[in-house]
Image (cartoon, rainbow, N blue to C red):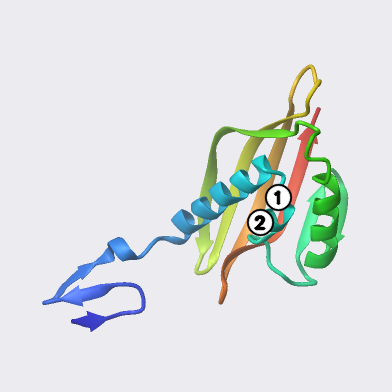
Amino acid sequence: MFMGSDRACRGGLCDSGQAQSGEDQVRRAIMDMNRAAQRLDADAFMRSYWRSPRLTITFDGETMRGWDIIAREQRKWWADKSAGIRFNEQRPAEIVSQGDGVVTSLQWMRVSRAGDQEPARLVITSVWKKLPEGWRVVLAHESLVP
């Protein structure tokens, strides 16, 4: 048996089922992020972000830099677990490889709070990079449309 970095080969036949594409790995990370968002679990949610002072996120025109700063703000936003905040995917995320080790994702969500008449729309564009620790968001832009 010959072992490659991402597949096992026996007798010249390779099982590529063990390897997942970057797009598939990012899709799985987005599903994990969505589950964390449903629980308002900021720490689990932030695991998919690059833990770097260079991480950059723009939300409704306000830009924040640095994982520590962004994580602190995320914890504040989701501190009230009784607010009834819900996130629902409107359609599956679009995930596109942009070359070796870079993937972009585009997501459409509905966000509601207990007592809101109509959910707001949230559009998220993210740039993911393959890092030694796995796929991480290195740049994101989110727009909330009430």
How much space separates mark 2 and mark 1, taking CA atoms? 6 Å
Label for residue 90?
none
Specify whether residue 66 is in view.
no
Specify whether residue 72 is in view.
yes
| Residue on which the image places disc 1 | 41
| Residue on which the image places disc 2 | 44
- Image x and y of residue 105, in percent: 59, 50
* Quadrant including the C terminus: top right
Q: Secondary structure at mark 2?
A: helix
Identified at 75% across, 72% down, the residue is 52
* Quadrant including the N terminus: bottom left
Identified at 50% across, 69% down, the residue is 100
Q: Secondary structure at mark 1?
A: loop
- Outermost residue, front side: 82
Identified at 68% across, 67% down, the residue is 50
Q: Residues within 10 Å of mark 2 (few under 14, many from 20)?
A: some
Q: How many marks?
A: 2
Identified at 36% across, 78% down, the residue is 5
- Outermost residue, top side: 117
